[in-house]
Image (cartoon, grey):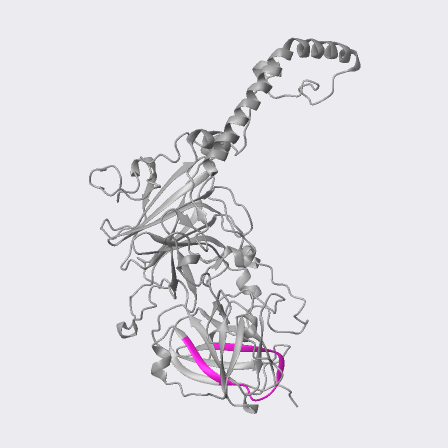
Amino acid sequence: MFNCIIIFFLLLVNSVAGHIILTFPEARYPPFDFLDNRRTLGPCGVPKSERSQLTSFQIGRNYNISWHIAKTPLKQENVKIRLLDYRGNELESERMPLFLGHGVTARQMTSAVQQSVEISFPFECRNCTLLIEKIRAQTNTDNSSLERSCAEVDISDTAPMNCFGNGIWEDKGSSGICQCSHGFSGQYCQYKDDCADDLECGPNGKCVANAIRQDHRSCFCQFGFFGTNCERRVKTLPNNLILFILGSDPDPEDQNCFRHVGPSPNAEANGNLRYGLFNPDCYSSKTLNKEETDERDRLHWRLVGNQLEIILDFWTTNPHNWIGLGWRPLQIPPSCRLFPQMISSLEKENAKTSGFSREWLEQPLHPMECVDMIMGSIREGNLLHIEDLYSRDMSSPLRDSLLDGEESLSAAYGLQTGNRTLLMFRRLISEIEPTDHPLGPGKIFLLYAKEESKIGRDEKLKSENDYQWKYHGSGSTNRSHIEIEFVNQSQMNQIRVPLIHFDHSTESGHNSDGKDPTKNEDDIAPSAEREKDVQDENEQNSSSSLPSTLKSEIIQILVLTFLIVNLIVYII
């Protein structure tokens, strides 16, 4: 006899064509939201992971199980919620009905992107899996297409009501309430936020709820600041410091090319500055849309030392909408789908919750697969939220930090003017870690997208959450991809590394071609009969060049001292 309960739940909801993920309990790691039965093996699409959150539920208590759908609904589908045993095996659905604390109507389900239902668990189920499936019947076939999301749960009568360790439970008679710790929110303190208030978003930044993701507070940073909590500031070092330290051009921070202090208050007087912000003459440019209209999207870029600066100049229907850019090498193999590695010791040999199907691993890459991405949104004209992301598959891109990567940006700015949304970012041309791809040299695959397409959607379902980071839709004006070359090999060869280097070949008498004087052209040490001559010659050169060497060292020390003093003064 099974020691677990079975939950089965069937509702009619509007079609979302993918992108479904549990938000409470927390989805299995990695939290991909497009785990369909055509590309991934079931029932969960990803194996169990030591990094997944185990959520404990108390028998008999009501909980709001919630999930997120990253696309506005279009047509009817079915949603099913059930429990699996610790091995991932399906159990008999007749053994236990779903317990609802309150009724949920079809209209309530179709009117919101964030879905939820109240459930009570009446029996014990240890180390189980909660599975949500969205099922779409295929026309004229017996097959069904489904997307799913899983979470690790443990149900018992001894589970404490401790707000999942993120708050303090206060009893209030027959009920109670969670007082959440700093950085957490929700009925059970189950959601982790980037910020709790505006004070955590740097100078003049804003902490905005549900702006990027549902049930999540995010920082929007003042012009010139970026980072999760606006903790990073774009610093414009003196030109001589940049020249020596970064190995860049003398004027990469020239206000005549890009106004790092902010848009010009008198844009008309600065006719060479587009939107009062940047001079297109300093950049290479490309129009991404075929139609020559005011709604076309543009891309601008320039080299800044060993970094690439890119400006997205996109037309958007609303100032709160998002824009994004992604890229990957042209010759990247399909095996890139295997990152991040998801082999787990928690999965038994006969467990069924693995990853990609072998058939799909052999297919050509989808434009969204294995892509390094940057996405951003603007609020109040110039408050920026920007993220460095990675897309393994057709799921919503994940922050690099979730996949053990880092934010790789060295500068970021945002501006909204009229229907134009501008996003500038800068990062190294070469890759830094596994969640990054190089931006050159040579041609790369480039993906661009923006906001959610309104084509074919029911305007009655429009909500205040339309501007969250959701699926862009299938409209050709909202996303596409091209091949592009930002940096050619010749330019890459001329880029100086970010180190201070002094050439003393003239002063010290070292041979200028960089060859080892103790070896011949065939890389063979000189014969014994020449060793004495070479030694005598070296001693003579060393003696004659001693004053020059000492002079060079003094100059080097003075230059380094000057640079350090300037850097200290700048930091202070």
Q: Please check the rendered image and state whether residue 364 is part of the magenta-colored stretch, yes or no.
A: no
- Above or below, 469 relative to 64: above
Q: Which residues are magenta?
A: 115-133
Residue at 30%, 35% in the rendered image: 281
Q: Is residue 201 left or right of residue 419?
A: right
Q: Is residue 496 left or right of residue 536?
A: left
Q: Nearer the viewer, residue 3 or 34?
A: 3
**Magenta region, mostly helix, strand or loop?**
strand
Q: What is the x, y in percent for residue 47?
A: 60, 68
Q: Is residue 125 left or right of residue 113?
A: right
Q: Nearer the viewer, residue 55 or 497?
A: 55
Quadrant for the N terminus, please.
bottom right
Q: Please check the rendered image and state whether residue 123 is part of the magenta-colored stretch, yes or no.
A: yes
Q: What is the x, y in percent for residue 215?
A: 42, 69
- Above or below, 510 relative to 449: above
Using the rendered image of the protein, determine whether residue 8 is visible from the camera's viewpoint.
no
Residue at 32%, 61% in the rendered image: 475
- Above or below, 142 relative to 555: below
Q: What is the x, y in percent for residue 258?
A: 33, 39
Using the rendered image of the protein, determine whether residue 375 is visible from the camera's viewpoint.
yes
Residue at 61%, 21% in the rendered image: 514
Q: What is the x, y in percent for residue 52?
A: 58, 68
Q: Residue furthest right?
A: 528
